[in-house]
Image (cartoon, rainbow, N blue to C red):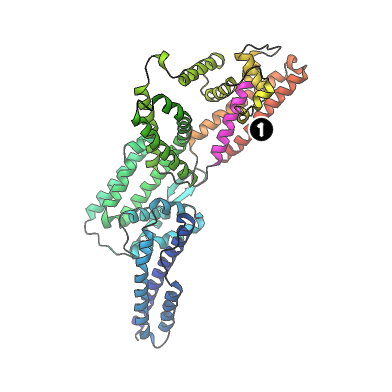
Amino acid sequence: MAIAEIGQLHSRYVRLSDKFKALWTYNQFATGVYKNVLRLPLPYNIDFPAIYDSIRRASDVIQTSSAVEAIPMMEESESQLQRALIPLIEADQIVTPPVFRRFLDQLKRRDDKKVIFYLIKFYLHADAVHGDQRDKIDFLFTKMGEDFFEARGEFWSRDPGELRRQLENLVSVRPVEFQDSREVTNLVNAVRTLKAQVQQAENFEQLTETRLLDDARALKQRMGNYFFHPDVLIAIIDCNVTVKNRFLRFYSEEEQYLIQESQRLVDSEEAIARGFGESSPNLMQEISTFRQLKQEFEESRANFNVKHNLVAQLRSSMNNILAQIDTVMPAPAEQMSESNMLELQRSDAIRRKFGEDKLLHDYILRIYGALESLDPHMGEELMVDAPETVDLRLEPWEAGAYLKLFHNRDRGQESEELLLLYMRSAALRMKIAEEANFLAAFTPQRPVQGTLLQKVKDSLDRANTYDQMFVNLLHDEIHYSDSNNLHRLYRSRFRLLRVFSGLWLIYDHFT
């Protein structure tokens, strides 16, 4: 056999081996997904070792004087791989894009590039490039073309020159002729326009309500084979990276709001049903929808797989409930529900004592409401250990400060400044503890954004202010000469410093 023909056989063997690696990689991926995510048995049984052995035997024959005998061996191996593609693609139909993304996001960054490379080749070899599989390929190309910079908490697009070489290598698996160069230019410009619109969005609602993300997906689905032109792919990857950074930034702000407000609705559901259920069946149906969306939201948060549509639907459902309550609730203040009137009265009482303190108002309100539900004559020690207040982790003298401020108990030598500080520091401890738990959940794959960090900084700054107030009071002769007062001041101060230091260490990690 001529040297040129042997060279062709070698090239054919390389392509055959590469295709085997692509199918084997998908098999490994599918095995992990079905076992660990779907909790289902693999729906196929392919003898990959036998296929590998036949390919290897063909390689061995190429090296001998009987190289021509390798041709039918490679043809049989190619047929085996082509037959194997059918059950693999059928199994892939069960793996939805969210499941696909969730599993791949768990891969360590140093390990995932090679896996992603061969997964793309698998879809190209199978010509599975439409519908949900287009979404998966889109995700894979983006994973291949992005890098994460921990110092900035952002994703960046890789160098276009290097990326282009890899893209050309990949799409050569499924050669496509691009006959209209103007269409390539038009598509690149369309993707860049979408990217610019995403960059102009100033909050999560603008990003979702304008349907920019849906428009981007629809455009990629309509591209047909032009999706695989390297210029178009580079533009798509760059746009996807921008979308990801924007989504992560806005979602970190939106998540805390959704958690707090959705829980408030859950806590109020019984009262809403009692007050408005009979007169507004649509409202009760919306609450049922809200409960389902909230469950999906909590599950997706646990799996770090929250999608923009789900966030938008949950917020919309919450807004619909509030809007319907507004339409059925009597307008005059004297006809307001008892629970709403009580909350307004509590808020007014707090504002009269503490002023307009947006940072701590809700937390002081939580302390006030819990203590107000108790018998004020039961004693401070019993009040802080009651089921209604035990989770607040108050000190007895902090409950005493509430009694002295709002129930006119004898203050002794304690000034109003000190009593307010006791309640404020207790409220700030609660806020800092929540923020520390919330901030600790962020990772390089789920980066924290600047707005949230600013809120945490506000809490840390307030803690510094209160610490200085405690220091000043500790030097006051009235308190310094009383061992009981001195113990209370030190204990409240050090409890605040303890949660402050925990939050500061987490905050420092992200700044």
- The secondary structure type at the circle numbered 1 is helix
Instruction: Give the image quarter of residue 244.
Output: top left
Q: Is residue 411 left or right of residue 167?
A: right
Please tell me whether residue 61 is drawn above or below residue 256 in the rendered image: below
Quarter holding the N terminus is bottom left
Tell me if residue 297 can be seen: yes
Please tell me whether residue 98 is drawn above or below residue 119 in the rendered image: above
Measuring from the top left, give residue 197's x and y in whole percent. 32, 39
Was residue 246 drawn as part of the magenta stretch in this picture? no
Quarter holding the C terminus is top right
Instruction: Give the image quarter of residue 136.
Output: bottom left
Q: What residue is shown at x 37% (from left), y 81% (from top)?
A: 73
Q: Main secondary structure of the magenta part?
A: helix
Q: Which amino acid type is shown beneath numbered disc 1?
A: Arg
Q: What residue is shown at x 34% (from left), y 56% (from top)?
A: 133
Residue segment shown in magenta:
422-447
Residues packed near mark 1 inside 10 Å, few (<14), some (14 to 19) or many (20 plus): few
Measuring from the top left, give residue 208's x and y in whole percent. 35, 38
User: Nearest the camera: 511 or 445?
Assistant: 445
User: Nearest the camera: 89 or 4?
Assistant: 89
Instruction: Give the image quarter of residue 497.
Output: top right
User: Nearest the camera: 25 or 40?
Assistant: 40
Residue holding disc 1: 498
Measuring from the top left, give residue 485's x and y in whole percent. 73, 19
User: Nearest the camera: 482 or 319?
Assistant: 319
| Furthest residue in direction bottom, as rendered | 65
| Furthest residue in direction front, as rendered | 278
Tell me if residue 158 can be seen: no
Was residue 429 drawn as part of the magenta stretch in this picture? yes
